Image (spheres, rainbow, N blue to C red):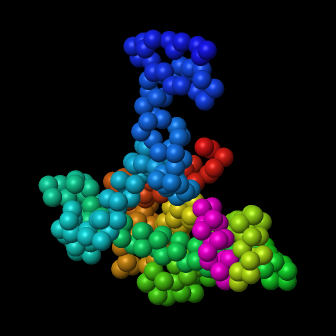
């Protein structure tokens, strides 16, 4: 004779078991069983599987570091594309009669040694710095990922040759290499500086991509695709690349801020960008000799550079934390 089922109590639900007994369930668990398809964990066919990228985006949206750095970078991008939104003057419009003067109505940052508006030059300098940083990062990421990915996938002689080449580039000091290579360049455009950064920056991304591809190609799904007769190009593009990109993205995001600082350093030393290009590095270099008499000339472009580099480093740290499975 089956045992009697206990009477209903408030906040509880009774569910009969297959053996004829009774199991006490919390009301919330009973409602979950009733409403969620596929069981209490929602593993039914209607439940979408979450990927690394969707989990990372969910974590990033909850990370205040990502939100703050993202807003700062978004603001910098906007003023780089449309600097006239917040600066109506011309960065090359100078008046020697106002040289080194401080803040005035309509000129909140004062004037530099040539009588140019520091505020306008600081705003327009964001375009140059972001252009150099973004293009250099894209070039380094593409070149390094392709060379390192191919070396990690095929191995053999190609891997050995590439490893020795990267060792040679790692032995070259970046600033010293810039002084040597860029000192013979007379162009005032950003392309020589970008080319130099790509030339000396790709080995780092190449090493990261190589290790990531070697790890990814050992996974079971890649071995299964190989056993089913998948071509090398299909395995690279379809199975390995999407799962090997995360470390490259993290390193490239952090490196973007480093390249912006490197451009300012080379311009400060006189071998990077050259006038009439408007650059934070050029303004910092010209203001260094007046730092005692007119510190405002150095404060504003240096502060804008520091905030920009810090924003990209913070963004890279947030992306790293979101994409690293070990931190979950």
- Provide residue 263's location: percent of width, then percent of height: 50, 70
Q: Give the range drawn in magenta.
A: 232-248
Identified at 52% across, 45% down, the residue is: 38
On the rendered image, what quadrant is the N terminus found in? top right
Q: In which quarter of the image is residue 301?
A: bottom left
Q: Locate residue 69 relative to residue 97 in the image: left or right.
A: right
- Provide residue 15's location: percent of width, then percent of height: 51, 25
Q: Locate residue 121 relative to residue 255 in the image: left or right.
A: left
Closest to the observer: 233 or 205? 233
Residue 56 included in the magenta stretch of the image:
no
- Provide residue 218's location: percent of width, then percent of height: 77, 66
Closest to the observer: 171 or 71? 71
- Provide residue 276's location: percent of width, then percent of height: 36, 80
Identified at 63% across, 61% down, the residue is: 247
Identified at 43% across, 57% down, the residue is: 308
Residue 235 included in the magenta stretch of the image:
yes
Q: In which quarter of the image is residue 111?
A: bottom left
On the rendered image, what quadrant is the C terminus found in? top right
């Amino acid at each position: 004779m089956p045992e009697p089922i206990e009477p209903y109590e408030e906040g509880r639900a009774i569910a009969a078991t297959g053996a004829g007994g009774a199991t006490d369930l919390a009301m919330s668990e009973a409602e979950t069983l009733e409403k969620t398809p596929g069981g209490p964990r929602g593993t039914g066919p209607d439940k979408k599987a979450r990927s690394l990228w969707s989990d990372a985006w969910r974590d990033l949206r909850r990370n205040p570091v990502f939100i703050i750095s993202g807003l700062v970078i978004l603001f910098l991008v906007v003023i780089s594309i449309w600097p006239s939104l917040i600066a109506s003057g011309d960065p090359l419009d100078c008046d020697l009669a106002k040289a080194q003067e401080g803040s005035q109505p309509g000129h909140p940052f004062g004037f530099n040694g040539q009588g140019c508006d520091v505020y306008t030059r600081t705003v327009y300098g964001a375009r140059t710095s972001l252009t150099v940083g973004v293009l250099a990062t894209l070039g380094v990421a593409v070149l390094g990922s392709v060379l390192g990915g191919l070396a990690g996938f095929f191995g053999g002689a190609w891997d050995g040759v590439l490893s020795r080449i990267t060792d040679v580039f790692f032995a070259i000091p970046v600033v010293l290499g810039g002084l040597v290579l860029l000192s013979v360049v007379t162009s005032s455009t950003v392309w020589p500086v970008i080319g130099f950064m790509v030339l000396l920056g790709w080995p780092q991304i190449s090493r990261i991509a190589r290790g990531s591809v070697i790890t990814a190609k050992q996974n079971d799904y890649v071995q299964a695709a190989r056993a089913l007769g998948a071509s090398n190009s299909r395995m690279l593009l379809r199975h390995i690349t999407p799962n090997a990109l995360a470390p490259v993205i993290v390193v490239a995001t952090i490196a973007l801020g480093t390249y912006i600082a490197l451009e300012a350093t080379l311009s400060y030393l006189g071998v990077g960008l050259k006038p009439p290009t408007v650059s934070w590095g050029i303004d910092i270099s010209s203001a260094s000799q007046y730092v005692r008499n007119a510190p405002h000339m150095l404060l504003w472009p240096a502060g804008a550079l520091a905030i920009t580099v810090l924003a990209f480093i913070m963004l890279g740290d947030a992306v790293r934390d979101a994409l690293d499975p070990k931190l979950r």
